[in-house]
Image: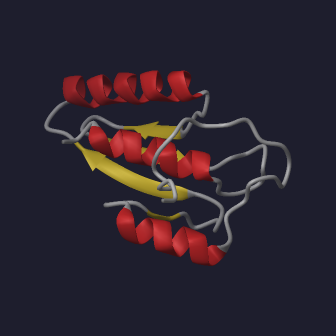
Amino acid sequence: MTQSIFEGKCEPCSKGEGLLDSEQVTDALKELEGWNPGEDGHSIVREFSFENFYRTMAFVNAVAWIANTQDHHPDLEVGYGNCTVTFTTHKAGGLTKNDFICAAAVNRLMT
């Protein structure tokens, strides 16, 4: 049985190492609720909405905890009642399994 792209722990990578091809990205996004390809073609993005600033910041702190435990850090754009999360693997130069592991973990915050 193969391991899901959404399971496991992030692994360090090098330039160009572990990049997913466009078919793998498309297939993974079909299973990852709410996430879309970034405009740059090398990232995945999701916007989360909240009823107030406190809940937004609680979410941001939870995402920061995930990022630190996985040693894989997203770009965050924070507003009063929203946060846009963008994952890419800068070091590899595109999307890797690490991005999907962390995106799935962020989604679990909302359940």
Q: Nearer the viewer, residue 46 or 26?
A: 26
- Left or right: where does residue 74 sit relative to residue 61? right
Position of residue 89 relative to residue 57, above or below, is below
- Left or right: where does residue 21 sit relative to residue 80? right
Q: Residue at x 84, y 43 (%)?
A: 14
**Which part of the image, by quadrant, shows the C terminus?**
top left
Which coloring applies here? secondary structure
Q: Residue at x 39, y 71 (%)?
A: 30
Answer yes or no: is residue 87 visible: no
Return the residue found at the far bottom. Answer: 23
The percent position of residue 16, horizontal first and vertical second, equals: 84, 55
Position of residue 66 relative to residue 50, above or below, is above
The percent position of residue 91, horizontal first and vertical second, equals: 78, 43
Q: How many marks?
A: 0
Q: Residue at x 78, y 50 (%)?
A: 92
The percent position of residue 110, horizontal first and vertical second, equals: 22, 41
Q: Nearer the viewer, residue 27 or 62?
A: 27
- Left or right: where does residue 45 sit relative to residue 110? right
Q: Residue at x 52, y 22 (%)?
A: 69
Q: Nearer the viewer, residue 34 or 40?
A: 34
The percent position of residue 100, horizontal first and vertical second, equals: 51, 51
Answer yes or no: is residue 31 visible: yes
